[in-house]
Image (cartoon, grey):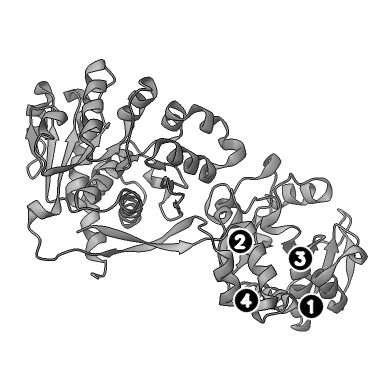
Amino acid sequence: MPVAPIFETLMSVAEMAAADAAAPAAGVPSMTLMEKAGLAVADEIGRRWTPRPMAVLCGPGNNGGDGYVAARVLKARGWPVWCESIADPGALKGDAAEAFRRWDGVTMPVSPDNPMAELFVDALFGAGLSRPLDGEAARLAAASARIAERVVSIDAPSGIDGDTGLAAGGTAFHAALTVTFVRRKPGHVLMPGRERCGETVVADIGMPAAALSGALRGTAMALAGGLSRRGDPTAHKYQRGHCVVASGGWLTGGAARLAALAAARAGAGLVTLAAQEEAAGVHANHVTSVMVRAQTPGALLADPRKNAVVIGPGLGLDEAEAEQLEIVLAARRATVIDADALTLLGMHLGLKVHGACVLTPHEGEFARVFPDLAADLPVTGRLTAVRAAAARCGAVVLLKGADTVVAAPDGRAAIDALSPPWLATAGSGDVLAGLIGGALAQGAPAFEAACAGVFLHGAAARALGPGLIADDLPGAVSGVLAGLKAV
């Protein structure tokens, strides 16, 4: 029973700009889009706050134009609102200049001496800015950290790169609400952008479908809540796949048991722990539905029905384990490479992965396998780095974290924006590896299996709530699966 994630399509900054540019030819003037954007911001503010003194901080481009429209709408609704500009409004061009011309209220330069507002709208730069904030913009961004619950950002908190979620120079606005348009961008779901956005609302501003179809060219997706279940409902256990989980010594065997239980809960028809002799008895005392064999994973893979492998949790780092990893990779089964197996890849550069593999590093393990890409993470961001890693090794790479990123060698990528912070507990990653292995055993392709594992992992954690430990997670997966619609 393979599982297929449901995704939300994201747009890059360039794709959004292309759609904006194509809209007039598709029948929607750009000024109409700006008017609808400003109206949407005003509507979302009105849903959350009653009228109060409000300052709209306007920048030198179209983000500032959206701010002038929102100010005009709110003023007409009785709000005491004024605009503060970091640039000469007389120098505005195009739609932003027209939005300022239509604004019939007070505009003043940004200054610490201005009247104190109770609510602030950040309409300075939006998602397209990739340089550090400076001057008054940087001062306002720093101040926003103290009053984030009173800040609304248009498009994205100024200073946050819409493609990477990074704050150039470390300075960016903090907001309680961000109103963006048409689609979210990667920066809305990647950290620290996600945290800086507060609640993110995507407003429909009437972007014509023709403008979108010409703009979208494969930007990353976000896991958007839900999986579909597919496959033959009459399949017996042998048709649902057989996952082998490699185990190290008995002292570290708990990691492999967590992975094995997760693979079974994810739906693999059979799961076998390939145990070292000293660990087999310990495993047998802890598991019942999972089979235990005092054999190497390579020996078990002589049986072609064993179609998926999880290797790494509690494996060990000796030459014997490196040889077993090499044998597993040579068998070319669908394989999850986690934990110690990732460290072995970094230690033995001659080991080559293949297209049916899923690598699941945290940032430290990512640095061991892809040291140059890890060094560039603070500049390129996680999405770019993980895509580059997947293309380089020819396998799916899943970089774990608060904003887990999954990338395939063909450029497809997904960002997890759903998993809760209480997953940061020992053994949680072993469970994730097992969930992916269970999906692989059922025939899911590597990218889809990785995304499905991330979704199930996060959904189980949300169902359990704070205080969970890794032992709790496999048992919670059945409840998540039970709530899915069969298709």
* Element carrying mark 2: helix
Marks 2 and 1 sit apart, C-alpha to C-alpha, by: 29 Å
Q: Amino acid at mark 2?
A: Glu
Marks 2 and 3 sit apart, C-alpha to C-alpha, by: 16 Å
- Say which of 124 and 296 sits in front: 296
Number of disc labels: 4
Residue 136 percent location from the top left of the image: 83, 50
Q: Amino acid at mark 4?
A: Ile
Q: Please state which of the two labelled residues, at mark 1 or mark 3, is closer to the viewer.
A: 3
Among the two numbered marks 2 and 3 on one chain, the one whose residue lies closer to the N terminus: 2
Q: Residues within 10 Å of mark 3 (few under 14, many from 20)?
A: many
Contact? badges 2 and 4 (CB < 8 Å): no
Marks 2 and 4 sit apart, C-alpha to C-alpha, by: 16 Å
Label annotation for residue 205: 4
Q: Please state which of the two labelled residues, at mark 4 or mark 1, is closer to the viewer.
A: 4
**Residue under numbered circle 1:** 72
Q: Amino acid at mark 3?
A: Asn
Contact? badges 3 and 4 (CB < 8 Å): no
Q: Amino acid at mark 1?
A: Arg
Contact? badges 1 and 3 (CB < 8 Å): no
* Element carrying mark 4: loop
Give the quadrant of residue 273: top left
Among the two numbered marks 2 and 4 on one chain, the one whose residue lies closer to the N terminus: 2
* Element carrying mark 1: helix
Among the two numbered marks 2 and 1 on one chain, the one whose residue lies closer to the N terminus: 2
**Residue under numbered circle 3:** 62
